[in-house]
Image (tube, coloured by chain):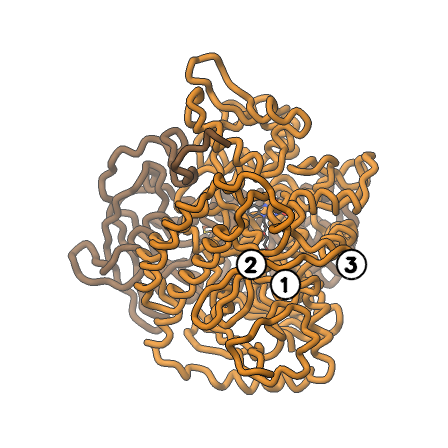
Chain colours: A brown, B orange
Amino acid sequence: MGRVPKSTILNRRKSRRETGPSEKAEPVRIDILRRKSTDDAPYWQSFLYTPESSSDTVAMALTGINSQENLRDVDGNPAEEIRWEKSCLQKKCGACAMVICGRPMLACDAFLSELKQPVRLEPLRKFPVVADLMVDRSVMFRNLKDMSAWLQQNAEPSEKKNLPAHEASRCIQCGCCLEVCPNFMPDSSFFGMAAMVPSARILTFSKTGKGEFQEEYRRHIYEGCGKSLACRNICPAGIDIEGLLVRSNAAAVWHRRAAKK
Amino acid sequence: MITIAGAGLAGLSAALTCAEHGAECVLLSVQPSERAQSVLAEGGMNAALNTMGEDDAPCFHYEDTMKGGVFLADPNAVKGLTDAAPDIIRRLWSLGVPFQMKGDDLLLRPFGGQKKRRTAYAFSSTGKAVMNALIDEVRKYEAAGLIHRYSSMEILEPLTEEQDASGTEAWSIPYTAENHNPGKRRILKGLLARDTRSGELVRFTGPLILCTGGMNALFSGMTTGSASNTGDLTAAFFEQGVQLGNLEMLQYHPTTAAICGKRLLVSEAARGEGGRLFIKKKDGSGDWYFMEEKYPELKNLMPRDVVSREMFLAVHDPACEDQVYLDMRGLKKETWEGKLKDLREEVIHYLKLDPAEDPVPVSPGIHFFMGGILVDEHHRSSMPFLWAAGECACQYHGANRLGGNSMLAAVYGGHIACEDALKYLDDEASDAREKQISEQDGKNSFSPNELHAWTRVRPVFEKKLTEILAEGLGIYRDENTLMHALERLEKLGSAAETHPERRRAMVGRAMLLSALERKESRGAHSRTDFPERNDDIYCRTTVSEYKEGRVEVCFRDIPALR
Ligand SMILES: Cc1cc2nc3c(=O)[nH]c(=O)nc-3n(C[C@H](O)[C@H](O)[C@H](O)COP(=O)(O)OP(=O)(O)OC[C@H]3O[C@@H](n4cnc5c(N)ncnc54)[C@H](O)[C@@H]3O)c2cc1C
Ligand code: SF4
Ligand code: SF4
Ligand code: FES
């Protein structure tokens, strides 16, 4: 134990190699479409943020801006804390989805260095805004409940079934796919890929043939989807939406197991 | 009706247990379950399923867990956990968790601190897969009207009342209530919450199972967990007299890396599947695989506290460079594709290097709180009608948690807590429910200023607190640094402006005092001034309590195995 040095705060030491070079970066302008509450009118406000490292994300920028004492916008006007949702900060929980430079993305997955400047942030447009970048996505969860998305009987797992089931369970319910879908609206009977993906796990472990859930699937997913696949490359979890869709349609609509792709 | 606060693994498991008994409950969380920290769990979940032909049995799981926790856990509780584990995994499997299989049975992977393979997993996204299955199952009971779900409720305050203590003598955790009137005891009455969507204030009454996760906000940006688990509720209950246990026991996970605003975990599965730790020698004599040299039996899979300490010593060894690497270059292609696909993708994405080709620079980061709300084996806290389960509770893990045991403990603990809470509902069931609905009319009876006082924590305050606690509660501790941290915290605490600020400082103080009072080295707690383990005095639970305006720390005997 004799070799233990004085400074015992190892975890505070950021090794150079661990964080990459941190050349002092230029400030980035961040334009945010803000709104005090659901009923207030939206307005744009701009802020400056100086990245701490070359790998800073939009999430980092928002945290940085919010941590300023007496927050001011780019024109020096006092501003209120920006409201947005976060949890995991590693693209695994879907909380921080927003429209970044016109594209639905996760703030913790959007690297500033890869974005066009000024960086434009807007709330997802398909959902009611709670405040600033925070939206109310409860409709996504309501939809899953409405279509009875749960197993009707115990699963009989196999290595083969586990692969699509695992892929399906990766959906983080972020809503990015709904944002770009021409057919999804919060009040429509079409529930979109955010409901299709979790359904794929249910269908994988359901008996083949006609059933209540298969019928729900047909009504809320199969019938409404234009199959344009505008949603294809949007999913931040990188889920194989097309593969799951083909499989689920086969099981729910044609009552057969899809041939392994 | 029972109220369950928090909807991660522990909260979902409690709600499910309640519904399966045909009882109604309220399930509250500030975000939907998909956002709970539990979805981050990677490596897997332990159970002595004995599917690998290694003659495993729950008694060995029990031994490893007690030994890993250096005998600071309640043996009866651990026995219950390890005995129940195989059934829990099989149940989850039947709910459609895509656990990796070997033929028709479950495939298990090796994990730190355990001599046999007993960790069931789904690639390196086990938490996500288990959560998904539980979310779907809970949804079934939501639709049936048994689980009343509110997933945008930020819980602000516990509602407690001083009451006649008669009838609560049987509550098993002793309550040292000298500061209260004799014969009186503070009892839980409910919760005050705010709907983050509408801003409305809502009250929930009745027995409460707290499942709100670890205390990440005390180490802001330094943990692998979720920013949503602030620990503010734990702190609020602490202020109300609820006892906390083993707060000095923080788990540093050996293999983490700093990314934006947090620490990224590189799962223990990486070492379970053959990843090796090394450091470069300054004289150019090559790479030193120090774990393999020092621990020929378990090598890189020693318990986390041991690995973290060895890494600390290695980077401070004058003969070595100052960075430890995790070497996964020797892993087979099948392992990457079949078992660690998502881990690899994540490392490439956030650290910009391919672990199959380059060693990954890693260092220890705070990963788990073994300490928390002190509970007995039924998950009762020291306050009547308050239960706690999951990471917010202090149970099962003692001085060091084994990887794969906390998902298990969250599922099992939520279940046990609910079973016990249901016993207290018998005669009052319908009554409590009516109350709950009618009391929701008490909304919005607080001014915006009052609300602000509850919720706001200034970022400067959070940062200072983190700095102070990190100083005192590093991998190695000693009296001087702890005293210095306490002094600094005293100053910071007196500058607290809001309730959560004041309470965080209070819990921070309790953590530092716990570390100061435990004058020995055990598990995650290493004192350079007391390097030996001292069972005579300290094979006991550290108890923190807030009374008469002061944080006090004492030690309490651990029950013997029945
Ligand atoms: C990166 C990572 C990897 C891990 N890997 C493993 C592993 O492989 N195996 C293993 O066994 N364990 C692992 N763990 C640990 C394990 O995942 C957790 O300990 C466990 O999931 C905790 O579950 P929980 O139910 O207690 O809490 P959580 O899942 O954290 O849930 C807390 C809940 O409380 C809610 N909440 C918090 N505060 C409030 C409030 N004020 N108001 C309302 N709601 C609130 C949250 O919204 C959430 O719903 C890992 C942890 C991390 C961070
Ligand atoms: S394929 Fe087209 S219609 Fe169907 S979900 Fe995707 S975007 Fe929407
Ligand atoms: S399918 Fe992908 S984009 Fe759609 S909600 Fe799920 S994770 Fe998000
Ligand atoms: S914070 Fe979880 S996905 Fe961004």
Q: Amino acid at mark 3?
A: Gln
Specify the quadrant that holds the C terminus of chain B.
Answer: bottom right
Q: Quadrant of the N terminus of chain B?
A: bottom right
Relative to B65, A240 lies left or right: left
Q: Residue at x 61, y 31 (%)?
A: B271
* Mark 3 surroundings: few (<14), some (14-19) or many (≥20) residues within 10 A: few
> To which chain does the residue with label 2 belong?
B
In x, y percent, where is residue B270? 59, 33
Tag 2's secondary structure? strand
Residue where numbered disc 3 is placed = A153
Q: Position of residue A151 (x, y in %)?
A: 72, 58
What residue appears at the point 54 percent right and 53 percent down from the top-left corner?
B37
Q: Which residue is mark 2?
A: B372
Residue farthest toward the left in the current orientation of the protein:
A75
Query: Depth check: B349 or A35 in front?
Result: B349
Can you say whether A30 is above or below A238 in the image?
A: below
In the rendered image of this protein, does residue B419 appear above or below residue B352?
below
Question: Which element is circle 1 on?
Answer: loop
Cα–Cα gap, marks 1 and 3: 35 Å
Query: What is the crowding at mark 2: few (fewer than 14 residues within 10 Å), some, or many (at least 20)?
Result: many
Q: Which mark is residue B375?
A: 1
